[in-house]
Amino acid sequence: MADNVRLEPQPANKCFGCGGGNETGMKLAFEQDMARRRIVGRFVLGPRYQGSGGMAHGGVIALLLDEAMGKLNRFHAVTAVTAELHVEYLKPVDVEKEILVEAFEAEQQGRNLFYVGEVRNEAGQLLARGKGRFVTITPRA
């Protein structure tokens, strides 16, 4: 099996974050790192997603973390929804610089999947961290 699978926005998907079928959406693409069991994305957000002072809006950071963590459900071949999302904003995120968004699994308890997401700058500094609990609702078709 390939080490990485590219997760491109799909035209039939209307998701604001990762869907290709949402005209005003972000159309985020990620990579599924099979060897490390991680989801990875690299983005330059641009001024459209700023809050103030050229820094990313906090809601956009939460969305990036939620999207990356949600893609981890692919490793379990399930559909799971976000039940809880906690975000720590550690440093401002410059909308003009590339960021790395990465997510990995922390643990599983029955239908509950606990994930961690991180946002880092080009120097590797941790800018934001998210912890999420996702609840499995159906096996993936």
Image: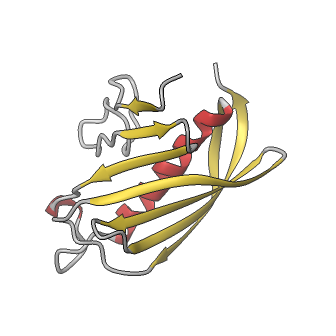
Residue at 31% x, 51% y is 42
Q: Give the image location of residue 13, x and y in percent.
A: 40, 29
Q: Give the image location of residue 67, x and y in percent.
A: 46, 49
- Nearest the viewer among 72 and 138 is 72
- Picture quarter with the N terminus: top right
Give left or right: position of 100 versus 118: left
Q: Give the image location of residue 91, x and y in percent.
A: 36, 81
Q: Is residue 72 above or below residue 44?
A: above
Q: Give the image location of residue 20, x and y in percent.
A: 31, 31
Q: Quadrant of residue 47?
A: bottom left
- Nearest the viewer among 46 and 52 is 46
Q: Quadrant of residue 31?
A: top left
Q: Quadrant of residue 81?
A: top right
Q: Is residue 71 above or below residue 83?
A: above
How is the protein colored in the picture? Answer: secondary structure
- Picture quarter with the C terminus: top right
Q: Is residue 108 above or below residue 5?
A: below
Residue at 72% x, 36% y is 137
Q: Is residue 111 above or below residue 118?
A: above
Residue at 58% x, 52% y is 104
Residue at 37% x, 48% y is 41
